[in-house]
Amino acid sequence: MPKRFLCLVLFLQAMLLCLTGSLATAQDAPLKVGTFECPPFSIRDEDGQHRGLSIYLWQEIARQIGASYEIVDMSLGELLSAAEDGTIDVGASCVSITEPREEVLDFSHAFYETHLAIAVREASLLTTVGNFLSDGEVLYWLGIVLLLACIVGGVYYLLEHRDNPTLYTRESRSGKMFEGFLLGLLSVTSGPLDYFEFRSLTGRAITAFLAVLTTVFIASFTAILASAFTFDRLRSDIAGPHDLADVNVGVKETSTASNYLDAQRIGYRTYPTIPDMLDALYSGEIDAVVTDDPVLRYEIHRGQQAGTYRTLTVLPQPFERQNYGFVLPEESPLGEAIDRALLSVRNTSGWDAALGRYLGSAE
């Protein structure tokens, strides 16, 4: 065998051994999984152990694909950057799948659908009464009612006050005028009096006309007040996203909530964690907190169990729907295997039990 050929064979064998060794080393190396605190999806216990819905799902996926891993704690911004530059292999927490993130990252299939929500302080009884009495829309419709009462009462007064001692019992003119106003108020708000209570034909005709008119008016007035001044508006000056522009809002740094407020051109303050935001809301430093609904409800529930956050509540109006997924570097070779395992785990009773265990208090 010529020396040149022998040298070539030996060189190729050496390269093959090196490549095989490198692949084996890469396959044996544990995956780096980034996470950040986001109860109930990612929780770090006092002993340093990680748990939560996302962590449970990842543990089951890793078991199915036969991967070893190590979990690295970081912030949301650090996790996204680490996935973008390939420093971590997977990001597992409560990361929403968004178009801007998809431009520089890959995501697994979605495993949880949610939306943004708003937490506020419930108003005290005195503040609730003040909100009712100072609401412009309510005052407008109360003014309409009083005006109609004055008109109807005035007409009744002119027609009946001289000849009807049953309806007009006061001796003074001012007393009879006030009785006329009360008749008008009762006619407008609860329907006209009995037809035979009036002596004049005109008074009886007006009463018959009001019997039809007030039925429609009372129904419309009640519906307008019910839609314009709900119980949630009584409890807080903030009823939904449209009220956020006029108050101090807190959001988490580099979150979908901050992106939403940026798009709406609403100013806000950023906080590193959700408990930091809720503490600021509870103390009156800010007026509202915007973040993901299940995370918000979980933290408030946990705080109330510990004796704090007693006046905090989550508004029922959902907005800006989103989905959580595992974060992956672009063109990650793990993507297909993770997706298959994820779909498999979500069809198990263990997943249903995990949903109840971690989200039961957040619903």
Image (tube, rainbow, N blue to C red):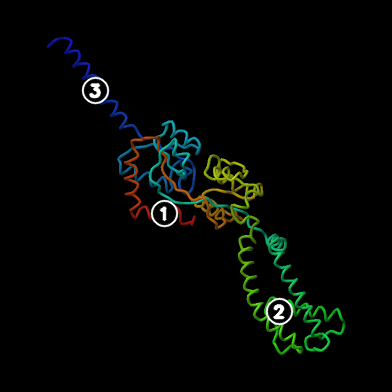
Q: Residues within 10 Å of mark 2 (few under 14, many from 20)?
A: many
Q: Earlier in the sequence, mark 3 or mark 2?
A: 3
Q: Which mark is residue 158?
A: none
Q: Which residue is mark 1?
A: 355
- Residue 89, percent across and down? 39, 35
| Residue at horizontal 32 percent and vertical 45 percent from the top | 341
The residue mark sitting in front, 1 or 2, is: 2
Mark 3 → mark 2, Cα distance in angstroms: 99 Å
- Determine the residue located farthest toward the left in the rendered image: 1
Q: In this view of the protein, which residue sits in the foreground, 304 or 92?
A: 92
Could you say which is closer to the camera, residue 308 or residue 314? 314
Task: Give the amino acid at mark 3.
Answer: Leu
Write the residue at 67% across / 60% down. 124
Q: Earlier in the sequence, mark 1 or mark 3?
A: 3
In percent of width and height, residue 246 lies at 66, 49
Q: Secondary structure at mark 1?
A: helix
Tell me how far mark 1 sits from mark 2, CA to CA.
Answer: 56 Å
Q: Which mark is residue 187?
A: 2
Helix, strand or loop at label 2? It is: helix
- Which of 181 and 257 lies nearest the eye of the viewer? 181
Amino acid under label 1? Leu
SS for callout 3: helix
Residue at 44% over, 39% down:
102
Outermost residue, top side: 3
Pointer 3 residue: 17
